[in-house]
Amino acid sequence: MISMIRILPLAVLLLAGSADTTLSQDAPPQPIGQFLSVRSPIDDSVIGRVRKVAQDLAIRTEKESKPSVLVLELAPGNSPIHQVQGLASLLSSARLSRVRTVAWIPKSVTGLTAVVALSCNEIVMHPDANLGDISRGEPLDEASRQFVQTLVEKRRNAKVNWPLARGMLDRNAEVIRATVTGEDKTVKSRVVGPGELQLIQKSNPKAVIEVSRIKDSDDLGLFSGEQARRLDILVTQTAETRSDVAAIYGLPARAMKEEKSSKGETIARLIKIDGPIEPMLHRFFNQQLARAISEKATVIIFEIDSPGGLLTLAETMANDIAALEERGIHTVAWIPREAISGAAIVALGCDDIYMHSEARIGDAAPIEMKEGMAFERAPEKVLSYTREVLRTLAEKKGRPPGLAEAMADKDLKVFRVVNPQTGEIQFKTEAELHAAKQEFGDRQLVAETREDNLLTVNGRQAHELQLAEPPVSGMEELKQRLGIPRAVELRAIERTWVDNVASMLSGGGAAFMLFFFGSILIYLELHTQVGLCGIGSAVCFTLFFWARWGGTAGWLELALFLLGLALVAIEIFLIPGFGVFGISGGLLVFIALVMASETMTGSPSFQGLQKFGAPTATLMGSLLTVIAVAAVISHYLPQLPLLRRIVLEPPGAGELAFDPQLVGSPDPTGLLNADHGLVGQVGGAISVLRPAGKAKIGDELVDVVSDGPFINPGTAIEVVRVEGNRVFVRETHETS
């Protein structure tokens, strides 16, 4: 009896082990796979990269006896026919027969790039994306058509045949679905053209043939994912995200992270992103990024230590970093202390995130400043947009999108679950669990996403949540992890005093002063025409644009500003008066300065326009100050002994200002009234008339305007007409 008691537990264990073995034997092995972005236009580097990854998968398939899947994410755009043929031939070759190739179409793909999709075993499309219109309205040459036909007839994709492909090539081709019910009640469905339909009808005279049109003549041969799925053509499945595609083929999350492969020597560059994310930091970032690319860097490390800043700039920086994968550049975020708010968004744009164990990342909720310097949560529209940005970046880089969203949404809960088929630990929101096509067992709430809490984690927690790599202690360990030789010294270029000056000049107070002095100096130049004031004004406005160049200011703002100045100059010098040119020019100058003071991103909205309130108020205040100061200057400047000889003033202004007997007389000298005989009088130019300047007529010094070409000093002039307070003259040979 005792022996039986001893044996029973052993038997139970053996049976349990046997059951587990049976289950493991029955469960199919998890596929190995890799996502790979294919940019347009396709070139040799793209083909080489696809070849290497595909061959690596084929080798692993053979060694590990596991199925493999290569997912090619095709980007919109067109490509040269010879490059398309090269990539399509590679994908349809016998050496890749053991690799399951999938074309993933998240956005519409037309032109020759669509042929690459047809060369894959399967196609997965976003429901709203389109695929087709291969010729883009221009017929392909016979050799190219023959290539596509040969490619399709290999029947790599059961959802594609030549009649369908022909309809995507030729807008005049018809595509028909013929459903044939034979005498034995068997039903067969085929996609055919008109010629093939006639052959079917002749060869099956007694069969019942139902005909439905897939594509009419003169259609582009363009099919959406939803339409293709409904018609049972082209696509195997539809999906909305990379994660959905990975779930369809049972691929682990790491398969979505594209591996970087570099040929030859590793060229590493370090770019620091420290302090608040503002226009000057963005400009510095752009400069250093362009420099690293020009130096053919294969690895770029972004050392991030920032509390955040402008979300629009952070999003732009993150997308610029994420796009580097198309260049084959491996991007790494190194966070020694913190990457909070917008800085977290920048980090999520990198391929890998490495953190110190005590560093922090998260809290990316958008906020707005209200009256009284109080901060409030941004409106739901802004929050939804930020969540979408975070989700998109996370999906692209193979991180849990729900956790990325939880950085911005304090009410979003994320659960830790285990995939029952693969045993993989995953992190999903309630909505993702409901949308999943499989049942998950017990779910555990991620503590950092509890109610009323924005996800903020340290380096250890970030690794546990699959947001970051295992923590590192410092740069030397990071270099070791990245395979960068210890002898390679990574030294980031710091922001110089020039960058600091530019940052100071980009502030609101500096903008007020630069606009004020620039405008006042223009006013003085028009009255003195000595040149120095004009140079000073040009310096002020040059500093204004220089301090913002590459951040909030660009070629558009500069072009509008210069156009505005040109219109004002036309009004002053060529078409005297105050009309459409002067008003339009002034408005363009003002609009250009406002635009140069703030970044315009996204679609126009009330919230988006609100941010232009501060720079508009600053410039309006400066403009009003200019008007007030100009009024004072116009009254007192002509009386200064030093400037009296060069300041242009109305005729008789000095006498009018200081002779009490002349007060109330609109024109005591009679010089401004054509009825008193000024027209026809002869005098001499005292200053250069270009076209405005000074002339002596009789015993009076008069402000005049040339009615023709510029007139040099000492030239005899004649009054031709008087309009208001403007005296128009032209060169004459008579002498006074």
Image (cartoon, rainbow, N blue to C red):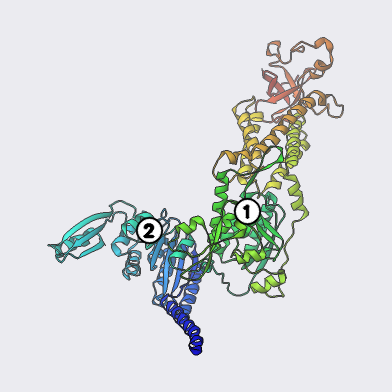
Helix, strand or loop at mark 2:
loop
Side of 582 relative to 684 (left or right): left
Q: Is residue 676 above or below residue 290?
A: above
Place residue 145 in its image quadrant: bottom left
Task: Spot the residue most to the left.
Answer: 206
Q: Position of residue 242 (x, y in %)?
A: 48, 61
Q: Is residue 184 above or below residue 287?
A: below
Q: Which residue is mark 1?
A: 454
Q: Position of residue 28 (x, y in %)?
A: 42, 75
Q: Position of residue 588 (x, y in %)?
A: 62, 35
Going from N to C along the chain, the mark reached first, 2 or 1, is 2
Side of 384 relative to 592 (left or right): left
Q: Position of residue 111 (x, y in %)?
A: 40, 58
Callout 2 amino acid:
Ile
Given residues 288 and 486, the one toward you in this image is 486
State the mark number for residue 134: 2
